[in-house]
Image (cartoon, rainbow, N blue to C red):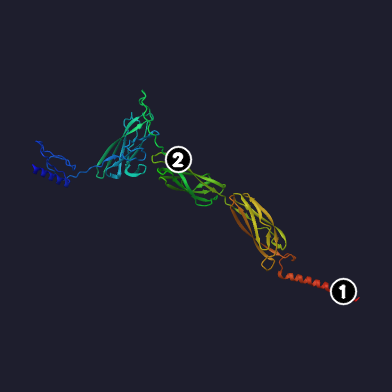
């Protein structure tokens, strides 16, 4: 008997090492039937007779509900008593499914059985869809789980009754070995906002549920913006770069559209569309929009707003809207025309002449504090020539007294002089601009008959003094002769 037991143990051990289907004889117990066989711990099926060859056992993948972690849309884990949320006439059901092995194409197909159409509170629809394997953040982002998250919005009837209703989810898949897998899960949905099924007698009030923490919607704001030009002028083409910010530190934004609108029809969009689609914007994430506009030359000066209209959803599918503004100023370019200084072409030393200055505003905005400063050798004005403010399309004039003196430099006092007339003016913001015009004039001697420049200006003073001295000498001689004659007499 001991030999038989040892032989049986050796046979079993060899079978386990080889991974094949083996048979072993059980120790007979008081006449028990030992002609049959049973499955070993290796999972091989037992059968009568001799084995026909080696058999490889393949275990199919198993699908289970993740009951230890809390996913987006769940206020509790399954082990804590998760109940699908009912809001706005619908039920949001989340079923996180895990697989013990990799599946073919990394996907499963899930269908929903809503139960009896008469008694169930759900609107009958086809909720079957494919679920891809993805990584999902759980427990408020504490960790990441790789699995198949089946989420459904189940529409409710308007005349539903309160109660707990089962919803059956059936999942199909194939593992890498080609094994067909099918698993069903039953999840209960509790309706509390419908009719009371037991109006008579009144049911005892249910204990009040613990208040849920408020859920705040993610906000998307305009974080910053900049333009392609420091100063925006009417008639320019300018590009605005606008940075959006998801202010939420926990929730992402999805399926977002942003539309921009101009303040008036005098702003023409150069881009093909005024709407931008953003697939996702993560928590604390930013996105830069770019729009190009052409500004009409006739637009009045002032501050304007571009308005952004935003439409987006959170991770649970809740929809939200938002608005942002981009402020900017438009200036009209200053266009001035200045005439040359109006003075006689020939000026005489020691004269004071009146000079005329003129300026015209050709722009579309008012010009302030228009004035002119004269600079020329031999000419000087009595201070700044002030014209004043000039309205669009108007002309301003002013006159000033110009004193004529001789040319400097140690040479001739007379001759050609070249001067400049510098105009200064300001826009509505007080920013100063300037423009220079030139002029020429001739300075002549006061002793010339025709006020023309003499050929030798430097020697005439000595000539005049010599003539005067000669005349005085003649008078002195005549006076002396007469005095001598008078003494002689």
In this view of the protein, can residue 53 be seen by the observer?
A: no
Nearest to the observer: residue 442 or residue 147:
147
Q: CA distance from mark 1 to mark 2?
A: 122 Å
| Residue 67 locus on image (x, y percent) | 31, 39
Q: In which image quadrant can residue 91 be found?
A: top left
Residue at the outermost right position: 489
Residue 483 shows which numbered tag?
1
Residue at the outermost bottom position: 488
| Residue 244 locus on image (x, y percent) | 45, 46
Please identify, in this view, whether the residue under mark 1 or under mark 2 is nearer the observer: 1
Nearest to the observer: residue 455 or residue 258:
258
Q: In which image quadrant can residue 404 be found?
A: bottom right
Task: Give the structural element (helix, strand or loop) at label 1.
Answer: helix
Left or right, residue 38 beside residue 213: left
Q: What is the crowding at mark 1: few (fewer than 14 residues within 10 Å), some, or many (at least 20)?
A: few
Residue position marked by numbered label 2 in the rendering: 321
Quarter holding the N terminus is: top left
Q: Earlier in the sequence, mark 1 or mark 2?
A: 2
Left or right, residue 246 beside residue 387: left
Q: Are marks 1 and 2 in contact (CB under 8 Å)?
A: no
Say above or below: 448 vs 81: below
Quarter holding the C terminus is: bottom right
């Amino acid at each position: 008997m001991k030999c038989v037991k040892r032989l049986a143990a050796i046979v079993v051990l060899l079978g386990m090492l080889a991974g094949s289907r083996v048979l072993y004889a059980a120790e007979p117990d008081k006449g028990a039937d030992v002609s049959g066989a049973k499955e070993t711990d290796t999972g091989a099926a037992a059968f009568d007779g001799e084995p026909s060859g080696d058999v490889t056992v393949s275990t199919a993948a198993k699908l289970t509900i993740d009951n230890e972690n809390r996913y987006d849309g769940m206020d509790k884990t399954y082990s804590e008593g998760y109940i699908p949320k009912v809001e706005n006439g619908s039920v949001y059901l989340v079923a996180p499914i895990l697989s013990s092995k990799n599946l073919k194409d990394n996907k499963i197909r899930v269908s929903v059985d809503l139960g009896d159409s008469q008694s169930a509170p759900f609107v009958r629809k086809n909720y079957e869809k494919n679920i891809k394997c993805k990584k999902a953040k759980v427990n408020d982002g504490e960790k990441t789980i790789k699995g198949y998250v089946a989420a459904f919005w189940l529409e409710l009837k308007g005349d539903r009754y309160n109660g707990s209703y089962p919803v059956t989810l059936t999942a199909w898949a194939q593992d890498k070995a080609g094994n067909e897998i099918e698993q069903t899960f039953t999840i209960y949905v509790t309706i509390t906002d419908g009719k009371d099924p037991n109006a008579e007698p009144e049911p005892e009030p249910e204990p009040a549920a613990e208040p849920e923490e408020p859920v705040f919607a993610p906000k998307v704001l305009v974080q910053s913006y900049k333009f392609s030009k420091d100063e925006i002028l009417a008639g320019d083409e300018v590009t605005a770069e606008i940075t959006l910010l998801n202010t939420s530190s926990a929730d992402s934004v999805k399926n977002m559209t942003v539309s921009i609108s101009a303040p008036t029809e005098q702003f023409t969009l150069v881009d093909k569309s005024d709407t931008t689609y953003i697939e996702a914007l993560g928590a604390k994430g930013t996105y830069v929009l770019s729009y190009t506009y052409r500004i009409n030359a006739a637009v009045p000066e002032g501050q304007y707003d571009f308005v952004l209209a935003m439409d987006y959803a959170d991770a649970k599918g809740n929809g939200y809207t938002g608005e942002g503004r981009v402020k900017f100023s438009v200036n009209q370019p200053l266009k001035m025309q200045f005439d040359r200084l109006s003075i006689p072409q020939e000026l005489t030393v020691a004269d004071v002449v009146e000079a005329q200055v003129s300026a015209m505003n050709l722009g579309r905005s008012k010009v302030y504090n228009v004035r002119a400063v004269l600079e020329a050798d031999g000419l000087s004005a009595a201070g700044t020539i002030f014209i004043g403010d000039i309205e669009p399309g108007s002309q301003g004039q002013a006159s000033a007294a110009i004193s004529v003196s001789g040319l400097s430099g140690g040479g001739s006092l007379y001759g050609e002089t070249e001067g400049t007339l510098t105009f200064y003016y300001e826009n509505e913001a007080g920013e100063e601009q300037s423009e220079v015009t030139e002029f020429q004039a001739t300075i002549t001697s006061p002793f010339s008959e025709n006020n023309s420049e003499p050929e030798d200006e430097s020697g005439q003073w000595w000539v005049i003094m010599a003539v005067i001295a000669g005349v005085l000498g003649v008078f002195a001689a005549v006076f002396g002769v007469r005095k001598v004659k008078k003494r002689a007499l």
